[in-house]
Amino acid sequence: MALLKKNHSPIGIFYPLSYNSSMFSSIDYRYIDSHYPENSLFLCFSDMKTLWVEEEKSTDNPFLQNSAHLQEKAFHIGYYNERPVLAQRVLSVDNTKEANIRDYLHLKDSTIVGLLVRASQLLTWQENHQYCGRCGKETIAMTTEPAMVCQGCNHHIYPVLSPAIMVRIRRDNHILLARNARAFCNTFALIAGFVEAGESLEDALHREVMEEVGLKVHNVRYFSSQSWPLPHTLLMGFTADYLSGDIKPDGEEIVEARWTDPRREESIPRPGSLSRILIDDFIEELNDKEMV
Ligand SMILES: [Zn+2]
């Protein structure tokens, strides 16, 4: 019964990745100068993938408590335990070490993950739009809304998101797992890809599945979504059933793919990722079946 309910849930019922709703609201989203509230917490990045963390307590807490070294303007991106959280890109901060943002994206505290993703995406967007793409003049960040505005032609540039699909394809008691040529540690994961201009999500899903592994699918259903910061992806997860075709990895993005019982796989994506949540959901279904 539980399975039936999950499979037939309309969008919005099943929320494995929902963030604390108090974290984001329209008023939180501002660019402010260096007069920070005293109790602020800081997320400081040296580049898109690298942040500065305190030498101690760094495994589960990416926040810096002290803004003494920071002179630049910052994005106020939300709250953590009712303390304002500000995001900045800085060259270095004393008494800190560099850490990879990937190591923090799997924390159980989804509020921290959401703040990190937002910080990284906004700072990347800001850095990529310091000059107007229309006339070439410098832009400045607005303080009333999230926008970079051109000083020459008043062109407004809003934060960029790149939609991408991910799909778990089922064939009887197996799912398709594939190894991407760039995968870490030879991880086997789900098929995924960016949505092209002019495509619907469904178009992108069918195209990616055909391009990467040569299969046709049907019974496509929405599952859940995840914001991902490398660099600014909104990943939308679906489930689908195998329809026809033999597996043919494209040899470029996908170097190996197979129908498998994911419980037998040694290397699957890390907990917390949408890929892993989709895989774990299928494992739960298999386990439930075996108990009947
Ligand atoms: Zn311009």
Image (spheres, rainbow, N blue to C red):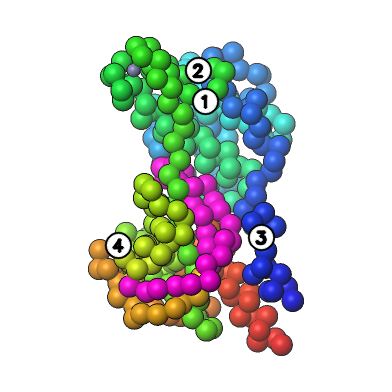
Secondary structure found at label 3: loop
Query: Which residue type carries mark 2?
Result: Met
Q: Looking at the picture, does residue 161 appear above or below residue 267?
A: above
Q: Are marks 4 and 3 in contact (CB under 8 Å)?
A: no
x, y percentage for residue 176? 44, 74
What secondary structure prevails in the magenta region?
A: strand
Look at the image and tell me in which quarter the N terminus lies: bottom right
Q: Is residue 252 above or below residue 140?
A: below
At a point 45% along the width and 48% down the height, the residue shown is: 163
Left or right of residue 177: residue 16: right
Residue tagged 2: 142
Residue that mark 3 sits on: 10
Q: Is residue 248 left or right of residue 126?
A: left
Dots 2 and 1: beta carbons under 8 Å? yes
At 52% from the left edge and 29% from the top edge, which residue is drawn? 87
Q: Which residue is mark 1?
A: 146
Label 1 Cα neighbours within 10 Å, binned few <14 / some 14-19 / many ≥20:
some
Please tell me whether residue 222 belongs to the stretch shown in magenta.
yes
User: Which amino acid, mark 4?
Assistant: Glu
> 31 above or below 257?
above
- Indicate the quadrant where residue 177 lies: bottom left
Identify the magenta region: 214-239
Res. 253 mark = 4
262 and 107: which is toward the camera: 262
